[in-house]
Amino acid sequence: MWHVKKFAQLSLTELEQILKMRQDIFIIEQESLFSDIDGKDQEATHLMKKEGNVITSYCRILVGDNVNINRVVVNKDHRGNGMGRELFQYAVDYAKDTYPNKKIEIIAMAYLDEFYSPFGFKAVSDTYDIAGHDHFDMEYTP
């Protein structure tokens, strides 16, 4: 089941699962030393899919001049079944429906270009390094 919550609506259990999943995947699995807890979770909208009490996929959305989808992550015990595509499609649909006139931005690991392109995202920058991994900016324009 899909859930859309503001920070204050997250249970402590959900918050712990989210932070642990982001830490396990971004920092430990991908060996990216960066500050995942960046002070932006409180202003974000948190999208997650849960099976029972377990968060299986998650991302957050930040809104300013544009909509930014980030921290896109799938629980490693639930990979390989299209859940990443389902999560990202849900996030894009949510952004389009909620903010119909805004561009949607992401910062993508360079090797994931083929993952994001079918959703209508196009690279808008050269590659640059974040925590030892090549990334580039991508946008979807309504």
Image (cartoon, helix red, strand yellow):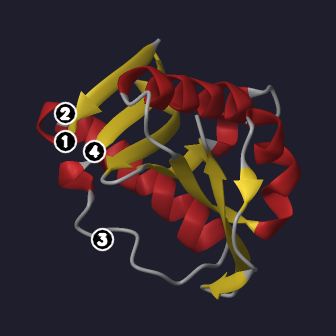
Residue ID for mark 3:
38
Q: CA distance from mark 1 to mark 4?
A: 9 Å
Q: CA distance from mark 2 to mark 4?
A: 6 Å
For disc 4, the neighbor class at 10 Å (few under 14, some 14 to 19, many from 20) is some
N-terminal of the two: label 4 or label 3? Answer: 4
Q: Amino acid at mark 1?
A: Phe
Q: CA distance from mark 3 to mark 1?
A: 14 Å
Kindly check if marks 1 and 4 are in contact, taking CB atoms under 8 A apart as contact.
no
Q: Which mark is residue 16?
A: none
Using the image, determine if residue 134 lies above or below residue 91.
Answer: below
Q: In the image, is 128 to the left or to the right of 55?
A: right
Residue at 37 percent across and 55 percent down: it is: 19
Q: Nearer the viewer, residue 94 or 96?
A: 96
Residue at 80 percent across and 26 percent down: it is: 81
N-terminal of the two: label 3 or label 1? Answer: 1
Residue ID for mark 4:
15
Depth-wise, is mark 4 or mark 3 nearer the camera?
A: 3
Kindly check if marks 2 and 4 are in contact, taking CB atoms under 8 A apart as contact.
yes
Location of residue 101 by image quarter: top left
Q: In the image, is 39 to the left or to the right of 71?
A: left
Residue ID for mark 2:
11
Q: Nearer the viewer, residue 16 or 135?
A: 135
For disc 2, the neighbor class at 10 Å (few under 14, some 14 to 19, many from 20) is few
